[in-house]
Amino acid sequence: MKAKKFGFVFGEALETSRKKKAATNIKDLKFAESWGDQYEGDHVGKLKISAWRLVPIYFFLFSGALILFGRAVDLQLIRGGLFLGKAEGNRIRLIINHAPRGAIFDRNGKILAQNLPGFTLVLDPQGLPKEKINQVAAKLSSILNIPETKILAKFKDAGNKSATLATNLPTEKALAIDAESSNLPGVGLEVNPIRDYPYKEITAPILGYTAEADQKDIERKIAVPYNLGDQVGKFGVEQSMEGTLRGIDGYDLETVTAQGEKKGGIYKTEPKIGQNITLSIDIDLQKFVYDTLSTEIRNVGATSGSAVVLDPSTGEILALVSIPSFDDNLFAKGISEQDYSAIINSSLKPLINRPIGASYPPGSTFKMVSGTAGLETGTIKKNTKINDPGFITLGSQVFQNWLWIDHHQTEGQINVVRAIARSTDTFFYQLGQMMGEKPIQDWAKTFGLGKVTGIELPGEEAGLVPTDEWKLETKKEPWYPGDTLNLSIGQGDLLVTPIQLSMITACFANGGNLLSPTILKDNGPNVIKENFLKKETIDTIREGLYQDNIGDGNVGWLFGNFKIPTAGKTGSAESGQTHPHAWYTAMAPYPNAKIIATVQVENAGHGSEISAPVVKQIFEWWFANRK
């Protein structure tokens, strides 16, 4: 084998240039023996050459032989494989069989994301002779109804690298290209599964989308590299569960002529499909919440909102709605520049998954936390009463209670249960003054605010728990007494996400366990903290939430006659706009809650009027359909 390679490099001249030797007979041998006789006598001494004078000649001869030997080793042993590979590359082509991604199901086995057959047109420049470029471009132009100049531009952009010419080809065009394959050297079809999302905008913020692997994906240093044409998760579950959903590509090796004509396959491996996953989402509930919230947003003239529904015992997310949304099929099937620009440049930011990726001041829903801080620090007890004067004056600032603003009335002497039920700002203003900002800040962080919850979705925001140090560093201002008052009622610089607030509500619903939310079925509960609250604190806050939903509680008018007992907290958070953010978070049934629902509508009005009715409809659907 080595001799053959040696001949391949230096040419057959090494063999054919040798002189053939004639047969030797006895006469020739005797004649050769007499060669030395004619040089005997004086002539012998005169012809003798010193051995030292031959050293340079030997040196040059040896050096030349060494150089030739080294060159042979370099060409045959060191770079022989490279030359052989290039030669083989002229007759062997690699075709990728893209692996389908795993399917995504809801908790009841309904398909949320699946694969449809698709065709991708790819270019292999090495198989396209230069003299046939225009001919191939003209043929593709007639089949695809694409200007020939565009196809030629793609050829030019590809250079010497493989490139995708078209994705998501209709079956009839793929068949037409296959029929003309002998006239399309360097052009091939790959069967490339296309992601399909049957629920579109309803599930897009959760599922995300896939897109063709770009150069950064292909160059990533991972165990199984991406190939051109592979689908990669770019958002939502598709991104966060990429390692599970992604399959392993198969490969075809086929021989082709120097002109790019296919001669047949020589080796094939089958693709391995990715693993399926099951989400905790109930798609029927998800669709109902999406439709209900969309209707409410339109009716009140708002533009954006979000909703979270979860199981308080496991942390499993049953519904996660973000409005406005987008059609993820546009991305999976090759989004146009016009559609992409419309989504990216929209002032409503439809790509933000609002329940986890947008943070807001929580307003009065935060009174669950400031009330807990007062009880846990011993600043107040369940029956400690504080007088509501209607407003508090602090320097030149006046901090008023909503009842004083709307009706010029006061609550009188009330305890924390009544203050939660009636959402009395002045009670919590004075509570904040009594204990200072530090306990409120500490308990906000204890409940997980100011950091991500850890849900298995990308793009989660941490929110913000403002502190003295933060304000001095960020705003170059000290902490003022008015900041403490604002913090105590969930205003000022405090920011939370709907998912964070939902987990606080769930903590009181399940008896004091702070859980990490999960989007995967049977993946919980993941308990972050337990036994960190006194039983009296839990019972007191829960009672306040229950009183909010009966009698003259803030939403007693809405839930008072509801057949399922509920407990919750409203919030109307000032946002610097004309209308506040409308919040409502609640549990049902009370006291043994099976479901938590949190609804927020941006810049819409009061939580009791905007968000609470949506939560009521969610509870009605749940207990009618999921008993």
Image (spheres, helix red, strand yellow):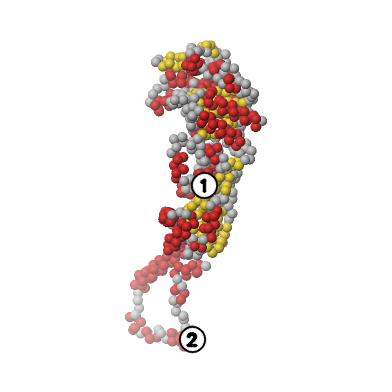
Counting from the top left corner in percent of width and height, residue 571 is at 51, 23
Camera-nearest residue between 92 and 400: 400
Say left or right for 318 vs 397.
right
Q: Position of residue 310 (x, y in %)?
A: 59, 31
On the image, which quarter does residue 552 sit in? top right
Q: Quadrant of residue 156?
A: bottom left
Residue type at tag 1 = Lys
Residue that label 1 marks? 333
Q: Secondary structure at mark 2?
A: loop
Instruction: Residue type at mark 2: give it.
Output: Asn
Residue 345 occupies quadrant:
top left
Query: Left or right: where does residue 522 sit relative to residue 386?
Result: right
Residue 578, which numbered label?
none
Q: In the orientation shown, which residue stands out farthest toward the front?
A: 299
Tell me: residue 427, above or below residue 176: above
Circle 1 — which element? loop
Up the image or down, 571 lies above or below 272; here it is above
Q: Which residue is mark 2?
A: 25
Which residue is at the far right?
Answer: 627
Quadrant into which the C terminus falls: top right
Whether residue 617 is visible, yes or no, is yes
**Residue appearing at x 48%, y 86% in the figure:** 25
Task: Please name the residue shown 43% across and 84% down the image.
Answer: 32
Which residue: 52% across, 31% down?
306
> Of callouts 1 and 2, which one flags the residue occurring earlier in the amino acid sequence?
2
Observer-nearest of 435 and 141: 141
Residue 140 drawn at (x, y percent):
47, 57
| Alpha carbons under labels 1 and 2: distance apart | 86 Å
Residue 447 visible to an observer of this rendering? no
